[in-house]
Amino acid sequence: MNHDTDHDFHQFRGTFDSAITPDAEFKAKMEKLLKAEKPVVTERTSSVLASPPKRPSESIMPARRSSPLMIAAAVLTVFAVVVASVWVLSGDMLEGEYASAPSGIATMPADAPETPGPDVQLTANSFHSAPDGIYLQGIYDGVVITQQWREHVSEKESEGGSAVHSPERTSVIVAQDQATGEVLWELDQLDFSSPRVSNSVLVATRLNWNDLDSQGNPKLEVLALNLKTGEVLWSIPVGDVGPGPVVQTVRFDLEVAANRVFIVYHSGTVQALDITSGEEVWETEFDPGDGEILQFRDSNDQEWQETRYNVATAIWNDLLAIVSGNYILATLDIETGELRASHNLSESEPHDGRLMMLEMEIQPIPTGILLTSLVSGSDTPNSVVQLVDPVTGEVQWTHEFEGTIDLHVAENGAITVNSHIWKLNSWLLQLFGQSGYSTHQLFWMDGKTGVEILQTERSRSDWMPFAMTDGTYACTRSDISEIVCFDRSGTRYLMQELIPTGIPVMVKGVLYVPTADGLYKVQLP
Amino acid sequence: MGPLSSKAKTQKSPSVRDDATALMTALPRLYGYFYPRVGGHKPLAEDLTQDTMLAAVRSGKSPTSPDELMAWLFAIARNKLIDHYRKQDREKRNLGQRVEDDDLGVQPGLPDLDLESLPLREEVTATLAELNPRYQAAIVLRYFDGCDVSTVAQALFLSESATQSLLARARNTFRSVWIARNGDAR
């Protein structure tokens, strides 16, 4: 049956936001809680060496001399008061070490210079208004690519022959000039992911529900567009259906470099295409490692198994680097597909037997590729980042972070690491269903040397955190409606006017921030 | 060039609690946000609503307008919801339970639904409740809340391609459960 990939789901947007009156009992409970709750005061000073917020001093109940019965009664009373008071006690006492609102205070390295000046407030300017929602795909060669949704009323014929008007939302890809905001082109009803750009050609993957295979499955395609005009240059289906009926089981990475597109199938095949024509230039094989065997069963009770591999890829200079889940690094020449180097990186493993898995992305910087692995830590998984030379296989530096991480790299090799840890609440709060909360911490590092430039305190994340750098500034989200940026001296720049609805993009000192009503530009000095 | 418009000083933000009436006015909308998104599970919706409002008060912020207050509360709410899905998914994994459903083959699309009708909205909610936490999270974030794929990916700690794959499976499973509950109306 032909149907768009998710048009039948877009009807849900905006229809589950109605107010619902809760039970009177819950309302009364909330009124009581809100009256008793008090805010935590945030102190901001100019010192970037400020220590973490201290816990308020705890009051000590005086000991009483009395009979054993009185003592028992007192203990029971204290216990009852503590349990009953769990909702009204300050969050400082019950919710972990950093209970204050996120401060965004930078903790500089020990040899930091004297404290810089006061905070600098930033202002936002509208780049593009989009009241129905906007998603920032990226900024490439001076072109801003966004995905937007347009509502329109479609006319259909009902069974009785009369016209029925129904609202629909369709996806539109929009390309705008970064300097002027001028719309260069738009493409309707297009939804793609993982865009890459090289030679002014934008390459991306998409599920094409208008082109189904013999089993009624949508074809997975790689699509190439002229970045400046939006002209579709070519599209090709990728992968085979495999043993099961769902084409989405095909896994691959897409890379571009110079005049080439590389489709790296996780099962161990690399296909190199000419970026302007889509014609195959070469194909070769690599060892994807051991993989994990998964069992599937369809609605007809037919069973089959599929092997899932863990493969990560990156382009580094004129080489395509492929790392398998077994830590085998294969480096291919992008022009010929020739194997230039192969190394077993597990021999350089610094994990002391704690290795859990390789993360699915590797990131190139000018001096090598950044490899992230998950290792077991004392309470949570930790993340180990290594800078590896793709030609020699030599590990240049290693750094371990608590928790899982998001890594972002700048063109000059500076990196930001956003470390996430889930913190458990005390047992009292857990009794009431508040098991824990997310926290994050920003690290800004010189990618070449692995030396830390700056870090923030670990803060609670009641919002979606992100972090990025352009080499001159490092930015992170310190509150729902607050973005904080630091320069290398530790001076803090604050944007408090926007509520980001997606991940911003930073290009040469300018932040592009998607919000509910469009895309904004924030210029850093 | 950003002006040096503020000097460092000790800031004492007025508490949102000072406008408790505004917060209580927001209660039905917050509860109404959570209720369908947790499959109509009333205690869970209440817990998440409570967490959101307490987080708002503790932050010490004071939005300047009702619209800003609601936008801010919904931003907290969404992240509470994401934490909830992550926790459920993690618990399921820790118990060794299967976290993705078996492959169901391609299912027909959903009919156009009159979602003004409360019973139909309740039916969508009940269908969502039958999905595993990851599928619930993917469907809610992408189609109820309109988040982009990248945001969904980051919320679920997945790559974008894995998220696209997850969304396709989630949609397929939702359609299958819907048909099982309501028949194929096409």
Image: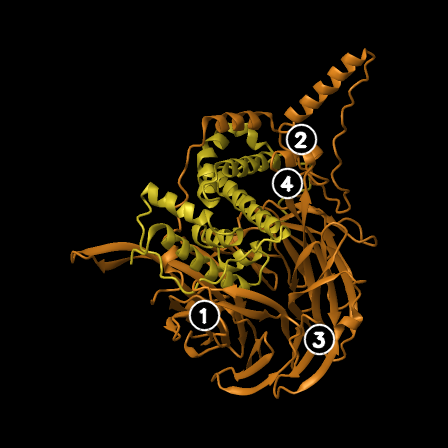
Chain colours: A orange, B yellow
Q: Amino acid at mark 1?
A: Pro
Which amino acid does the dot numbered 4 rest on?
A: Ser
Q: Where residue A495 sits in the image (x, y, percent)?
A: 59, 49
Q: Secondary structure at mark 2?
A: loop
Residue drawn 49% across the image and 68% down it: A248
Residue type, numbered disc 3: Ile
Side of A249 where A408 appears, left or right:
right
Callout 2 and callout 4 share a chain: yes
Mark yes or no: residue A473 visible. yes
Mark closer to the chain start, 4 or 1: 1
Horizontal and vertical percent position of residue A78: 72, 21
In the image shown, does B186 or A173 lie closer to the viewer?
Answer: B186
- Amino acid type, mark 2: Ser
Of the numbered discs 3 and 1, the one sitting upstream in the chain is 1
Q: Earlier in the sequence, mark 1 or mark 2?
A: 2
Per the image, label 4 sits on a secondary structure element best described as: loop
Q: Which mark, by number, is residue A435?
A: 4
Instruction: Give the residue at x 72% y 20%.
Output: A76
Q: Which mark is residue A90?
A: 2
Circle nearer the viewer, 2 or 3: 3
Report, in whole angstroms, how far the alpha carbon at label 2 lies from the one at label 3: 51 Å
Asked whether, in this view, residue A370 is left or right of residue A131, the answer is right
Q: Nearer the viewer, mark 4 or mark 1?
A: 1
Q: Position of residue A315 (x, y in %)?
A: 63, 76
Residue A257 occupies quadrant: bottom right
- Cα distance in 3D space between marks 2 and 4: 17 Å
Q: Which residue is mark 1?
A: A245
Name the residue beneath numbered marker 3: A328
